[in-house]
Image: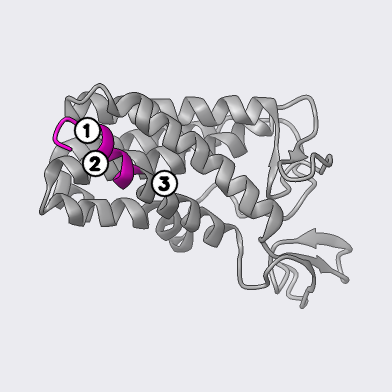
Amino acid sequence: MLVLSGTRWHGGAVLAAFFVSSNLISRIPHGRPVTGLDPKSDRRDHWQVYANGAAAAIGGIVGLIDFGLGLWLVTSTLAAAAADTWATTVGRWSPVPPRLIWSGRSVPAGTSGGMTPAGTAGAAAGALIVAGIGAVAAGMPVLLPVATLIGFFAMVTDSTLGALLQGRFYCETCKVASEWRVHRCGSQTTRESGRAWLNNDGVNFLATVMAGGAALVTWHWLSPQG
């Protein structure tokens, strides 16, 4: 509602591009088991919605004051969210295992912070789709490369934070790695690394907020109204 109130149908089109493309790509069968941490299912819960959409909602509020800047922020932050979603999904199709961006160490599929060439290409595609819709809706061609790059590098930031800071736990009952303090089996897990309070939703939120900051800087630097 905030996005639609501040950026009207233009922001609504960007929002639709993110949700439709992300949901479609997430539902394509990948045929490979995820053997890393135990992520959430493809159905989004309220924390995932906040993590991916809070920055865009703030952009909608800004749009009530400055429509152009608001739409610029909405597009850039949702491009970041799309890049992360596409990277995760397309990365599951990779024939090679992911590697941590910080150390280059090979990790099981599904491990936070792991990246593959396929997932990286997927991130660029997801950001490009959302950025393209935003650029057309805003009538600002420069938004296409700007939001695409912001979205892509936000995904890289997300992976870096995931590799270095996200909490990693181990369930002694199930003998599996987890990203939760309490495993889905109900057992308390043991922290192995990272910050206990920082989960994947927190990482996604930080990445989209950083994307919003980058969008604000580029608006004053590159935009037609800047």
Could you say which is closer to the camera, residue 223 or residue 87? 223
Q: Dots 1 and 3: beta carbons under 8 Å?
A: no
Density class for disc 2 (Cα within 10 Å; few <14, some 14-19, many ≥20) is few
Q: Position of residue 157 (x, y in %)?
A: 56, 46
Mark number, residue 223: 1
The three-letter code of the residue at mark 2 reads His
Q: Position of residue 150 (x, y in %)?
A: 43, 37
- Between circles 2 and 3, the one closer to the viewer is 2
Question: Looking at the image, is mark 2 or mark 3 earlier in the sequence?
Answer: 3
Q: Position of residue 2 (x, y in %)?
A: 21, 55
Q: Is residue 73 magenta?
A: no
- The quarter of the picture where residue 114 lies is top right
Q: Which residues are magenta?
A: 215-226
Distance between mark 2 and mark 3 Cα atoms = 15 Å
Q: Position of residue 198 (x, y in %)?
A: 61, 66
> Element type at marker 2?
helix
Could you say which is closer to the camera, residue 203 or residue 210? 210
Which residue is painted at 22% across and 41% down in the image?
71
The residue that disc 3 covers is: 211
Which of the image's four quarters has the N terminus? bottom left
The three-letter code of the residue at mark 1 reads Ser
- The quarter of the picture where residue 116 lies is top right
Could you say which is closer to the camera, residue 101 or residue 222? 222
Distance between mark 1 and mark 3 Cα atoms = 16 Å
Distance between mark 1 and mark 2 Cα atoms = 6 Å
The residue that disc 2 covers is: 220
Please indicate, yes or no, whether residue 15 appears anywhere in the rendered image.
Answer: no
Which residue is painted at 37% across and 50% down in the image?
213
The three-letter code of the residue at mark 3 reads Ala
